[in-house]
Amino acid sequence: MSEPDVIEVPKPSTQSDAASLTDKKYCLGCGKALHKSAPQCPHCGAPQADVVPAGSKSRVIAIVLALLLGGIGGHKFYLGRVGWGILYLVFCWTFIPSIAALVEAIIYITMSDQAFAKKYG
């Protein structure tokens, strides 16, 4: 078996070098340095898995739906969680889904846009 390639990370010599290293990451494919927000490597073209793509679902719409139609699972259907939406519909008469939707609306409000896009797309 061959030894895995080891990527050496340069140590910063000055304060400005340390700041420039925080804006860099290393390619998952070839290991070359690139900016931390690069969606793919300019050298080898490998996609970078840690970059969160812009989501197609709006966090604001999910919050409004959770507050207004949460008891019947409107926000779950919007976010593509159809199974959960059907479960909310089946149990809407118990008001438990309404309470859960209120809690989820609070979670959506406190969640960052990046975390929301990563979880719900």
Image (cartoon, helix red, strand yellow):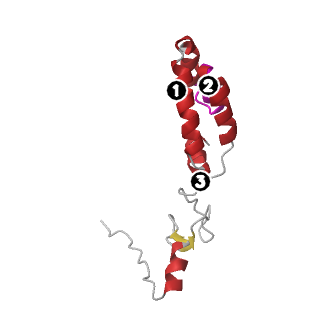
Q: Are marks 2 and 1 in contact (CB under 8 Å)?
A: yes
In percent of the image, x 67 and y 30: which residue is there? 65
Please name the residue that numbered disc 2 is placed on: 70
Relative to 108, does residue 72 appear above or below in the rendering? above
From the image, state whether disc 2 or disc 3 is nearer to you: 2
| Amino acid on which disc 3 is placed | Val
Q: Quadrant of residue 35?
A: bottom right
Q: Is residue 96 magenta?
A: no
In percent of the image, x 54 and y 39: which residue is there? 107
For marks 2 and 1, the one nearer the N-term is 2
| Amino acid on which disc 2 is placed | Gly
| Amino acid on which disc 1 is placed | Ala
Q: Position of residue 87 (x, y in %)?
A: 53, 18
Q: Position of residue 11 (x, y in %)?
A: 42, 83
In percent of the image, x 58 and y 50: which residue is there? 112
How crowded pointer 2 is (Cα within 10 Å; few <14, some 14-19, many 20+) is rated as many
